[in-house]
Image (cartoon, grey):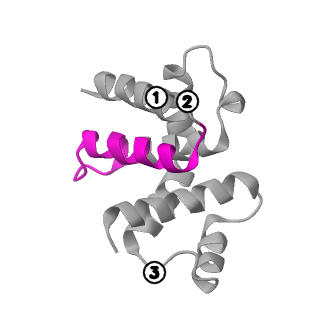
Amino acid sequence: MTRREEREQAFILLFEKSFNEETEISELYDLALEDEIVAESEFVKSLAFKAWENLETIDPVIEKHAKGWKLGRISKVALAVLRMAICEMLYFDDIPVGVSINEAVELCKKYAAKDDASFVNGLLGSVSKEEK
């Protein structure tokens, strides 16, 4: 499985979690494995779990850079993509920031509304400039 496919599976888990906040991410992962929605992958598991476990750090970063937007106004697809990409940017030193941004934009193009890709690209670009 490629890294892009693994990211897509981590995104699916985070998106699903946004509808099932009472269900543990590990339970969603196990169910997704059982139903063959995701394949067993340490990267998928690590990315999805780390993103969800660090929302108290990640969400304020999104809020800070989403000028004029509250988290509740951001589509669930874009929010899941942003959480995953910012998690990569903050916690995965071996992944270049540009790769995280590009992959997030591609996921938005595939799953999100028309304007979400440019919104996500701009927000992540702002985050990357501040992190340098």
Residue at image coords 26%, 39%: 98
**CB atoms at circles 2 and 1 under 8 Å apart?**
yes
Mark 1: secondary structure: helix
Residue 118 is tagged as 1
Residue 32 percent coordinates (x, y)? 61, 76
Depicted 5 relative to depicted 90: above or below: below
Q: Residues within 10 Å of mark 2 (few under 14, many from 20)?
A: few
Q: Classify the position of the C terminus by image quarter.
A: top left
Query: Which disc is residue 115 wearing?
Result: 2
At label 3, the amino acid type is Glu
Residue span colored magenta? 88-113
Where is residue 54 drawn, in percent x and y? 52, 47
Which of disc 3 and disc 1 is earlier in sequence? 3
Q: Earlier in the sequence, mark 3 or mark 2?
A: 3
Residue bearing mark 3: 40
User: What's the residue at 41%, 46% (across, down)?
Assistant: 106
91 left or right of 107 in image: left
State the predominant SS element of the stretch in magenta: helix
Assess whether mark 2 and mark 3 are in contact (beta carbons under 8 angstroms).
no
Judge by depth and name the residue closer to the eye, 124 or 92. Answer: 124
Instruction: Let me know if residue 100 is in the magenta part.
Output: yes
Which residue does the image show at 42% across and 59% down from the upper left?
7
Measured as percent of width and height from the top left, residue 127 is found at 38, 27
| Picture quadrant of residue 97 | top left
Q: Determine whether 130 is above or below 19 in the image.
A: above
Residue type for callout 2: Asp
Label 3 secondary element: loop
Between the residue at mark 3 and the residue at mark 2, the CA separation in whole angstroms equals: 32 Å
